[in-house]
Protein backbone atom coordinates (compact mmCIF):
# COMPACT_ATOMS: atom_id res chain seq x y z
CA UNK A 1 0.00 0.00 0.00
CA UNK A 2 1.31 3.44 -0.93
CA UNK A 3 0.90 6.07 1.74
CA UNK A 4 2.46 9.21 3.10
CA UNK A 5 3.75 9.08 6.65
CA UNK A 6 4.02 12.39 8.43
CA UNK A 7 6.47 12.72 11.32
CA UNK A 8 5.82 14.63 14.56
CA UNK A 9 2.17 15.41 13.88
CA UNK A 10 -1.26 14.25 14.94
CA UNK A 11 -3.09 11.58 12.96
CA UNK A 12 -4.93 12.98 9.99
CA UNK A 13 -8.69 12.88 9.66
CA UNK A 14 -8.21 12.93 5.86
CA UNK A 15 -7.38 9.22 5.61
CA UNK A 16 -4.17 7.23 5.98
CA UNK A 17 -2.23 9.29 3.45
CA UNK A 18 -2.35 12.56 5.38
CA UNK A 19 -3.22 14.24 2.08
CA UNK A 20 -6.14 16.63 1.67
CA UNK A 21 -7.49 17.07 -1.85
CA UNK A 22 -9.80 19.58 -3.50
CA UNK A 23 -11.17 19.48 -7.01
CA UNK A 24 -12.22 22.61 -8.88
CA UNK A 25 -10.84 21.92 -12.31
CA UNK A 26 -7.23 21.02 -11.58
CA UNK A 27 -6.53 18.58 -8.78
CA UNK A 28 -4.76 20.11 -5.79
CA UNK A 29 -3.07 17.77 -3.36
CA UNK A 30 -1.71 19.06 -0.05
CA UNK A 31 -0.85 18.02 3.46
CA UNK A 32 -3.87 18.04 5.76
CA UNK A 33 -3.81 21.28 7.76
CA UNK A 34 -3.35 19.54 11.11
CA UNK A 35 -0.11 18.01 9.79
CA UNK A 36 1.48 21.37 8.97
CA UNK A 37 3.28 23.35 11.66
CA UNK A 38 3.13 27.17 11.50
CA UNK A 39 5.41 29.43 13.52
CA UNK A 40 5.14 33.20 13.91
CA UNK A 41 8.39 34.80 15.10
CA UNK A 42 8.70 38.04 17.07
CA UNK A 43 10.86 40.41 14.95
CA UNK A 44 13.00 41.16 17.99
CA UNK A 45 13.86 37.47 18.32
CA UNK A 46 15.24 37.18 14.79
CA UNK A 47 19.03 36.70 14.87
CA UNK A 48 20.93 39.32 12.86
CA UNK A 49 24.45 38.89 11.49
CA UNK A 50 25.89 42.19 10.25
CA UNK A 51 28.57 40.26 8.37
CA UNK A 52 25.84 38.48 6.41
CA UNK A 53 24.22 41.84 5.66
CA UNK A 54 27.51 43.06 4.18
CA UNK A 55 27.68 39.88 2.12
CA UNK A 56 24.23 40.47 0.63
CA UNK A 57 25.11 44.12 0.00
CA UNK A 58 28.33 43.04 -1.75
CA UNK A 59 30.29 45.53 0.33
CA UNK A 60 33.59 44.70 1.98
CA UNK A 61 33.70 45.30 5.71
CA UNK A 62 37.10 46.88 5.13
CA UNK A 63 35.62 49.55 2.85
CA UNK A 64 36.81 53.11 3.49
CA UNK A 65 33.26 54.29 4.21
CA UNK A 66 32.46 51.33 6.49
CA UNK A 67 31.36 53.60 9.36
CA UNK A 68 28.74 55.19 7.13
CA UNK A 69 27.42 51.79 6.08
CA UNK A 70 27.41 50.56 9.68
CA UNK A 71 25.16 53.47 10.59
CA UNK A 72 22.84 52.84 7.61
CA UNK A 73 22.64 49.16 8.50
CA UNK A 74 21.75 49.97 12.12
CA UNK A 75 19.06 52.43 10.98
CA UNK A 76 17.70 49.95 8.45
CA UNK A 77 17.57 47.16 11.02
CA UNK A 78 15.48 49.30 13.40
CA UNK A 79 13.01 50.16 10.61
CA UNK A 80 13.00 46.60 9.30
CA UNK A 81 12.00 45.16 12.67
CA UNK A 82 9.10 47.61 12.88
CA UNK A 83 7.36 46.16 9.82
CA UNK A 84 8.47 42.58 9.22
CA UNK A 85 6.14 39.76 10.23
CA UNK A 86 8.34 36.63 10.14
CA UNK A 87 6.42 33.37 9.77
CA UNK A 88 7.04 29.91 8.36
CA UNK A 89 5.17 26.67 7.67
CA UNK A 90 6.63 23.19 7.40
CA UNK A 91 5.78 19.50 7.32
CA UNK A 92 8.01 16.43 7.50
CA UNK A 93 7.36 13.23 5.54
CA UNK A 94 9.03 9.90 4.86
CA UNK A 95 10.28 9.25 1.37
CA UNK A 96 8.59 6.26 -0.22
CA UNK A 97 10.90 5.72 -3.18
CA UNK A 98 13.52 7.36 -5.38
CA UNK A 99 13.76 6.51 -9.08
CA UNK A 100 17.16 7.69 -10.32
CA UNK A 101 16.42 6.84 -13.96
CA UNK A 102 13.24 8.93 -13.98
CA UNK A 103 14.79 11.50 -11.62
CA UNK A 104 11.73 11.22 -9.39
CA UNK A 105 11.25 11.33 -5.62
CA UNK A 106 7.90 9.82 -4.60
CA UNK A 107 6.08 10.50 -1.36
CA UNK A 108 2.94 8.59 -2.33
CA UNK A 109 0.95 7.78 -5.46
CA UNK A 110 -0.25 11.37 -5.75
CA UNK A 111 3.00 13.20 -5.06
CA UNK A 112 6.23 12.95 -7.04
CA UNK A 113 8.87 15.64 -7.31
CA UNK A 114 11.16 15.48 -10.32
CA UNK A 115 14.72 16.68 -10.77
CA UNK A 116 18.16 15.09 -11.01
CA UNK A 117 19.50 17.59 -8.51
CA UNK A 118 16.76 16.75 -6.03
CA UNK A 119 17.41 13.03 -6.39
CA UNK A 120 21.08 13.66 -5.66
CA UNK A 121 20.29 15.67 -2.51
CA UNK A 122 17.77 13.12 -1.19
CA UNK A 123 19.45 9.90 -2.31
CA UNK A 124 20.37 8.77 1.24
CA UNK A 125 17.59 10.60 3.09
CA UNK A 126 15.06 8.88 5.31
CA UNK A 127 12.77 11.88 5.68
CA UNK A 128 12.27 15.22 3.98
CA UNK A 129 11.03 18.51 5.42
CA UNK A 130 9.14 20.94 3.19
CA UNK A 131 9.01 24.60 4.18
CA UNK A 132 7.91 28.09 3.16
CA UNK A 133 9.04 31.24 4.97
CA UNK A 134 8.41 34.97 4.59
CA UNK A 135 8.99 38.36 6.21
CA UNK A 136 5.54 39.55 5.09
CA UNK A 137 4.18 42.05 2.58
CA UNK A 138 4.57 45.24 4.64
CA UNK A 139 8.32 45.13 4.24
CA UNK A 140 8.00 45.23 0.43
CA UNK A 141 5.91 48.39 0.82
CA UNK A 142 8.62 49.98 2.99
CA UNK A 143 11.31 49.24 0.39
CA UNK A 144 9.18 50.88 -2.30
CA UNK A 145 8.80 53.99 -0.14
CA UNK A 146 12.52 54.21 0.61
CA UNK A 147 13.42 53.65 -3.06
CA UNK A 148 11.62 56.88 -3.92
CA UNK A 149 13.14 58.84 -1.03
CA UNK A 150 16.71 57.48 -0.91
CA UNK A 151 17.84 54.71 -3.23
CA UNK A 152 21.04 53.99 -1.27
CA UNK A 153 19.16 53.53 2.00
CA UNK A 154 16.60 51.34 0.21
CA UNK A 155 19.46 49.18 -1.09
CA UNK A 156 20.90 48.80 2.40
CA UNK A 157 17.44 48.05 3.80
CA UNK A 158 17.03 45.27 1.28
CA UNK A 159 20.35 43.71 2.31
CA UNK A 160 19.44 43.96 5.99
CA UNK A 161 16.13 42.22 5.30
CA UNK A 162 17.92 39.40 3.47
CA UNK A 163 20.09 38.89 6.56
CA UNK A 164 16.94 38.89 8.74
CA UNK A 165 15.34 36.34 6.41
CA UNK A 166 18.26 34.01 6.97
CA UNK A 167 17.98 34.68 10.69
CA UNK A 168 14.44 33.30 10.57
CA UNK A 169 15.78 30.40 8.52
CA UNK A 170 18.22 29.72 11.34
CA UNK A 171 15.29 29.41 13.77
CA UNK A 172 13.56 26.98 11.41
CA UNK A 173 16.73 24.93 11.01
CA UNK A 174 17.10 24.67 14.78
CA UNK A 175 13.56 23.32 15.11
CA UNK A 176 14.01 20.85 12.26
CA UNK A 177 17.37 19.71 13.68
CA UNK A 178 15.66 18.91 16.98
CA UNK A 179 12.93 16.95 15.16
CA UNK A 180 15.55 15.03 13.19
CA UNK A 181 17.49 14.27 16.36
CA UNK A 182 14.36 12.84 17.99
CA UNK A 183 14.26 10.30 15.16
CA UNK A 184 17.97 9.48 15.27
CA UNK A 185 18.67 11.56 12.18
CA UNK A 186 20.62 14.69 11.28
CA UNK A 187 19.46 17.64 9.24
CA UNK A 188 21.50 17.72 6.08
CA UNK A 189 21.10 19.52 2.80
CA UNK A 190 18.75 22.43 2.13
CA UNK A 191 17.56 22.68 -1.45
CA UNK A 192 15.07 24.88 -3.28
CA UNK A 193 13.28 24.88 -6.65
CA UNK A 194 15.52 26.68 -9.12
CA UNK A 195 18.70 25.31 -7.51
CA UNK A 196 21.03 22.99 -9.39
CA UNK A 197 18.92 20.73 -11.64
CA UNK A 198 15.60 21.21 -9.82
CA UNK A 199 13.15 23.03 -12.08
CA UNK A 200 11.77 26.27 -10.67
CA UNK A 201 8.31 25.24 -11.91
CA UNK A 202 8.18 22.61 -9.16
CA UNK A 203 7.69 25.55 -6.83
CA UNK A 204 4.00 25.27 -7.67
CA UNK A 205 3.77 21.70 -6.38
CA UNK A 206 5.60 22.61 -3.18
CA UNK A 207 3.15 25.49 -2.66
CA UNK A 208 0.21 23.15 -3.19
CA UNK A 209 1.51 20.86 -0.45
CA UNK A 210 1.88 23.57 2.20
CA UNK A 211 -0.85 26.07 1.20
CA UNK A 212 1.33 29.16 1.90
CA UNK A 213 -1.61 31.44 1.19
CA UNK A 214 -2.45 30.95 4.85
CA UNK A 215 0.63 33.02 5.74
CA UNK A 216 0.19 35.56 2.95
CA UNK A 217 2.45 33.99 0.31
CA UNK A 218 1.69 33.43 -3.36
CA UNK A 219 3.39 32.59 -6.65
CA UNK A 220 3.58 34.79 -9.72
CA UNK A 221 2.95 33.36 -13.19
CA UNK A 222 6.73 32.98 -13.52
CA UNK A 223 6.90 31.01 -10.21
CA UNK A 224 8.49 33.87 -8.25
CA UNK A 225 7.42 34.03 -4.60
CA UNK A 226 5.56 37.01 -3.19
CA UNK A 227 6.23 38.80 -0.87
CA UNK A 228 9.70 39.26 -2.31
CA UNK A 229 11.58 38.39 0.88
CA UNK A 230 10.44 34.78 1.08
CA UNK A 231 12.08 31.37 0.89
CA UNK A 232 10.87 27.85 0.16
CA UNK A 233 12.47 24.47 -0.21
CA UNK A 234 13.27 21.18 1.42
CA UNK A 235 15.70 19.74 3.94
CA UNK A 236 16.86 16.15 3.86
CA UNK A 237 17.11 14.16 7.08
CA UNK A 238 19.65 11.37 7.13
CA UNK A 239 21.14 8.80 9.47
CA UNK A 240 23.85 10.50 11.53
CA UNK A 241 27.10 10.57 9.57
CA UNK A 242 29.55 13.05 8.14
CA UNK A 243 27.10 13.85 5.34
CA UNK A 244 27.93 17.24 3.77
CA UNK A 245 25.55 20.15 4.04
CA UNK A 246 24.77 22.03 0.84
CA UNK A 247 25.25 25.78 1.11
CA UNK A 248 21.98 27.61 0.45
CA UNK A 249 23.76 30.63 -0.99
CA UNK A 250 25.94 28.54 -3.29
CA UNK A 251 24.52 25.13 -4.28
CA UNK A 252 27.98 24.05 -5.45
CA UNK A 253 29.60 24.64 -2.06
CA UNK A 254 29.49 21.93 0.58
CA UNK A 255 30.21 22.29 4.26
CA UNK A 256 30.80 19.39 6.65
CA UNK A 257 29.09 19.74 10.01
Image (cartoon, rainbow, N blue to C red):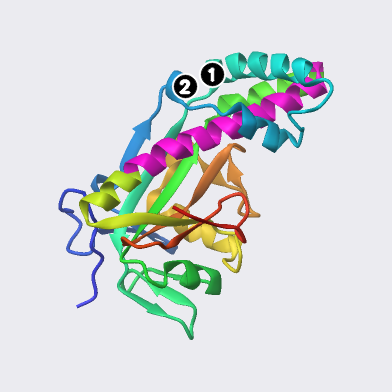
| First-in-chain label (2 vs 1) | 2
Residue at the limit of the structure toward the bottom, as seen here: 101
Q: Residue at x 55, y 53 (%)?
A: 247
x, y percent for residue 13: 16, 53
Who is closer to the viewer here, 240 or 223? 240
Q: Is residue 184 above or below residue 113?
A: above
Give the quarter of the image for residue 2: bottom left
What residue lies at 48% left-to-right and 86% top-to-bottom?
101
Label 2 Cα crowd, 10 Å radius (few <14 / some 14-19 / many 20+): some
**Start-end of magenta stretch:** 149-175
Query: x%, y% of residue 80?
Result: 59, 20
Foreground residue among 228 and 47: 47
Magenta span: predominant SS is: helix
Q: Tag 1, which secondary structure?
A: helix
Q: Point out residue 61 in the picture as x, y percentages from the top left corner.
A: 73, 29
Pointer 2 with pointer 1, Cβ within 8 A? yes
Residue 71, above or below 234: above
Res. 189 visible in picture: yes
The residue carrying mark 2 is: 43
Residue 81's tag is 1
Q: Quick one: 223 or 135, which is closer to the camera?
A: 135
Q: Residue at x 31, y 60 (%)?
A: 240
Residue in the image at 70% along x and 18% along y: 70
In space, the residues marked 2 and 1 are separated at their CA atoms by: 5 Å
Task: Return the mark for residue 113.
Answer: none
Query: Within the image, what quadrant is residue 175 found in?
Result: top left
Q: What element does badge 2 sit on?
A: helix
Amino acid sequence: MHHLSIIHAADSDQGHSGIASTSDGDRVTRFAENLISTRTIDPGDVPFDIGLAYKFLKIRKSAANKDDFDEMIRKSLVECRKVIAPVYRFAVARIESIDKKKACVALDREICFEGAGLVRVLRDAKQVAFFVLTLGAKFDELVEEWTVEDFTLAYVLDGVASACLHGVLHILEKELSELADENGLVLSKRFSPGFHRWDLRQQKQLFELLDPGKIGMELSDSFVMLPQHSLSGIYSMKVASSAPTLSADNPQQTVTR
